[in-house]
Image (cartoon, coloured by chain):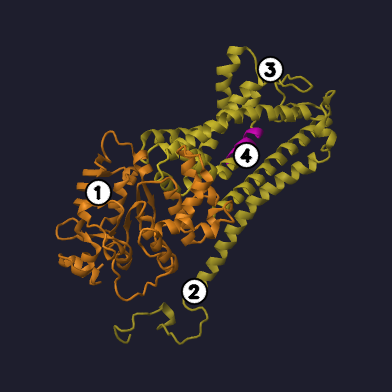
Amino acid sequence: MSSAASPLVLGESGLFDPMAPLAPSGNLRRRRVVNVIVTATATAAALAAVAMLVIVVYGVLKRGISSLGVDFIVQNPSGLAGGGIFNYLLGTAEVVALGAAVAVPLGVLTGIYLTEFAGRRSRTAGVIKLALDMMQGLPTIVVGLFVYGLIVIPQHRQSGFAASIALAIVMLPLMARSSQEVLLLVPNTLREAADALGVNRWRTVLTVILPAALGGITTGAILAIARAAGETAPVLICDSLFTPDGVTTNIFHGVPTIPMLIFSSVELPIPQAIARAWGAALMLMLFILIANIGARLILARSRARMGR
Amino acid sequence: MTAWDRTAGDGHAPPARVRLRSEPSIPLPRAIANGAASVETRAAVFDIRDMAVHYGSNCAVARTSLKIYRNLVTAVIGPSGCGKSTFIRSLNRMNDAIPSFRLDGQVLYHGHDVYGSRANRVEVRRRIGMVFQKPNPFPKSIYDNVAWAARNLGMRHGLDERVEQALRQAALWDEVKDRLRDSALGLSGGQQQRLCIARAIAIEPDVLLLDEPASALDPVSTASIEDLMHNLKHRFTIVIVTHNMQQAARVADRTAFFSLDTTGPDRFGTLIEYDDTETIFRGASDSRTRDYVAGRFG
């Protein structure tokens, strides 16, 4: 050791020498190895997650693609396992649309309450957020059972309407939370600007905040709808398995839906029925994939328009 | 160019488009140079009596009393953290959103208590407009930005003329008249700030509060905003917060100097001196004011 003036001692490599070549020295070699291992492990884990999706998509595509065709989409079923699935597609659209018609406005209004009207320290808002999170974790079969007791038993009838209400309960927390998150992204300076112009908060929300957040809210709605379209347990409990073979618009009776078609088809010991189930599964999956991609595009566009 | 003609019509020379910041001497405020009536004969828009502002237990602005006069530009200057922004935001109740905000004393606006039990804060802000430090246009078209408040306040009649008028007064019309339907976010920072001023004056407020309106802008944009103020004060009463002393000297008729009181255990903002701008910059009576305007601290 020379003196207290050279405190930069680097382990076994001796004194720190600023004039040495810039090749790795000291424990940097070991650190580089650790770095490569950690990077590789994390990348592999990320790839595995993507691989799962690819495998599922591939499996469904492989088995379902043979059933897919124009007839499969536009024709009603005939016989035990023949024809298309048009009435099932329409039925799912009816049930999900009614559920969304209930859940989307309620969800957006809940989000608006949480971000725009409840104070920052509001206890009510805290309770609502907690309730929404718990609702989101609620098993959907429990939601289905609840609506079974609420609507199906008093009416003595399973119906598309009951399934819609159950799906609305599934969608509501998703909708409320996503709306809240998007509304929080709207810069506070806009609220301040609007306040300083002497305009009521409600008008500000309607004409400045909501338009600014519309892209994000639409995205949230699409994702909630995609989730509800594939939801099986509530539909299974609340909607009837015994539905008309043709198109039905009577929402208060049994309405045929895709998840139920898949469920009942795979129960049948007929290869054509199994194939139909795969085809229906492919339709459902494609809808969800396209909805997700579309939602992302809308979000990206609205972000670009907001200038962020 | 009607807006320019009208404002230039009462004995004031039209302002130079661009004044350099490096101008060596401090120019005389225009109102004093032109022999305007002394402030004592002017009507007070704000009569602030013993106003003190607390955030929780922290005092932000200590007891302050001053009068703000009609059709003058009143500047509020002082070092960072001296409560300038708190002070100006208290005038139109923009601090109400802060949960721990508390105001003692009285803010009388034309004799009405701004914080009185019958005063509605939306109505307060409708009459007392505000422009903020960072330009904050709505993500809408240029036209809709200016028309938005008027529409929502039920002033739909002659909206196009109103928008044009406001943009002319904000000296922005010639730059945007061909692209009123384009997004306001495509404008430059200086243009956005003038758009925010146009948006504020489109609903014809009585008072315009400007919270460091030029601090995020380049010198040329700053100069155009300062020019604007000379014209706007004939129609509005203007209060401007600035940390730029030269700016206060250039635009203000009256200047209030706030400083940070650090003598006690707690630091709080306090009004040191309030007088004609000329007096504050040339012959302030308080040594702290003299030190500050001479650039010795802050």
Quadrant position of residue A114 = top left
- Point out the stretch of residues depicted in magenta: A220-230
Asked if marks 4 and 1 fall on the same chain, the answer is no
**Residue B256: horizontal and vertical position, in percent?**
24, 59
* Closer mark to the observer between disc 2 and disc 4: 4
Q: Amino acid at mark 4?
A: Ile
Q: What is the distance, in whole Å, between disc 4 and disc 1 at their CAs?
A: 58 Å
* Closer mark to the observer between disc 4 and disc 1: 1
Quadrant position of residue A122 = top left
Is residue B4 or residue A2 the one in the foreground? Answer: B4
Q: Callout 3: 10 Å neighbours few (<14), some, many (20+)?
A: some
Name the residue carrying label 2: A28
Q: Which chain is the one coloured yellow?
A: A
Q: What is the distance, in whole Å, between disc 2 and disc 4 at their CAs?
A: 49 Å
**Residue A65: horizontal and vertical position, in percent?**
81, 41
Q: What is the distance, in whole Å, between disc 3 and disc 1 at their CAs?
A: 75 Å
Q: Which chain is the one coloured orange?
A: B
What secondary structure is marked by label 1?
loop
Q: Amino acid at mark 1?
A: Ala
Asked if marks 2 and 3 fall on the same chain, the answer is yes
What secondary structure is marked by label 4?
helix
Name the residue carrying label 3: A253
Nearest to N terminus: mark 3 or mark 4 = 4
- Residue B60 visible somewhere in the drawing: no
Name the residue carrying label 4: A222
- Residue A60 visible somewhere in the drawing: yes
Q: Amino acid at mark 2?
A: Leu
Name the residue carrying label 1: B43
